[in-house]
Image: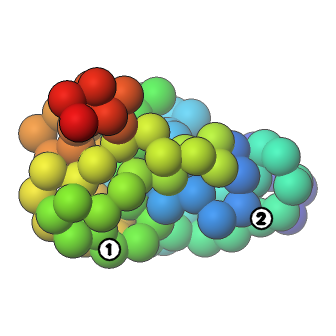
């Protein structure tokens, strides 16, 4: 693929990606920053520039993986292609500090 990616994941294996432009539902192409690999994702809702969306289904309590590390915990079920923000994710740092 030679055109610009519509989303980035920081590491292959991340469970979320980041929109590099305002995105509309549909099939998108993106790239891994670390490995340089290309992939596709299907969105089922609009995602604003700079925000995360799920690359896999997450059950409540599942880890949210970005940068190859856990950055959050799903606070509600999240389906592949859904917007991830404060309404359905808690910061892992906050969660870990409460343990």
Q: Position of residue 54 (x, y in %)?
A: 38, 59
**Res. 4 image quadrant:** top right
In the displayed structure image, the side of residue 39 where residue 17 appears, left or right: left
> Which residue lies under the disc numbered 1?
57
Q: Secondary structure at mark 2?
A: strand
**Res. 43 image quadrant:** bottom left
* Residue 41 appearing in the image: yes
In the displayed structure image, the side of residue 68 where residue 47 appears, left or right: left
Q: Residue furthest front?
A: 99
In the rendered picture of this protein, how many numbered marks are placed on residues?
A: 2
Name the quarter where the N terminus is drawn.
Answer: bottom right
| Marking on residue 38 | 2
Work out how far the residue at label 1 is from the one at label 2, CA to CA, in angstroms. Answer: 20 Å
In the displayed structure image, the side of residue 53 where residue 37 appears, left or right: right
Q: Residue at x 23, y 36 (%)?
A: 99
Question: Which residue is more in the foreground, 98 or 49?
Answer: 98
State whether residue 80 is above or below residue 48. below
Q: Position of residue 47 (x, y in %)?
A: 33, 43
In the displayed structure image, the side of residue 20 where residue 71 appears, left or right: left
State whether residue 95 is above or below residue 27. above
**Res. 25 image quadrant:** bottom left
* Residue 44 appearing in the image: no
Few, some or many C-alpha atoms within 10 Å of disc 2 (few <14, some 14-19, many ≥20)? some
Question: Which residue is more in the foreground, 37 or 98?
Answer: 98
Q: Residue at x 87, y 54 (%)?
A: 36
Q: Residue at x 11, y 58 (%)?
A: 76
Q: Position of residue 68 (x, y in %)?
A: 65, 50
Q: Nearer the viewer, mark 1 or mark 2?
A: 1
Q: Please tell me which of labels 1 and 2 falls first in the chain.
A: 2
Few, some or many C-alpha atoms within 10 Å of disc 1 (few <14, some 14-19, many ≥20)? some
Question: Which residue is more in the foreground, 81 or 95?
Answer: 95
Q: Position of residue 82 (x, y in %)?
A: 27, 59
């Amino acid at each position: 693929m030679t055109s610009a990616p519509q989303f980035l994941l920081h590491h292959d294996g991340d469970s979320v990606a980041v929109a590099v432009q305002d995105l509309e539902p549909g099939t998108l192409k993106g790239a891994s920053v670390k490995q340089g690999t290309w992939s596709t994702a299907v969105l089922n809702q609009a995602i604003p520039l700079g925000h995360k969306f799920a690359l896999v289904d997450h059950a409540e309590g599942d880890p949210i993986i970005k940068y190859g590390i856990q950055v959050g915990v799903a606070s509600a079920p999240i389906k592949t292609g859904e917007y991830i923000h404060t309404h359905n994710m808690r910061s892992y740092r906050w969660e870990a500090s409460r343990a």
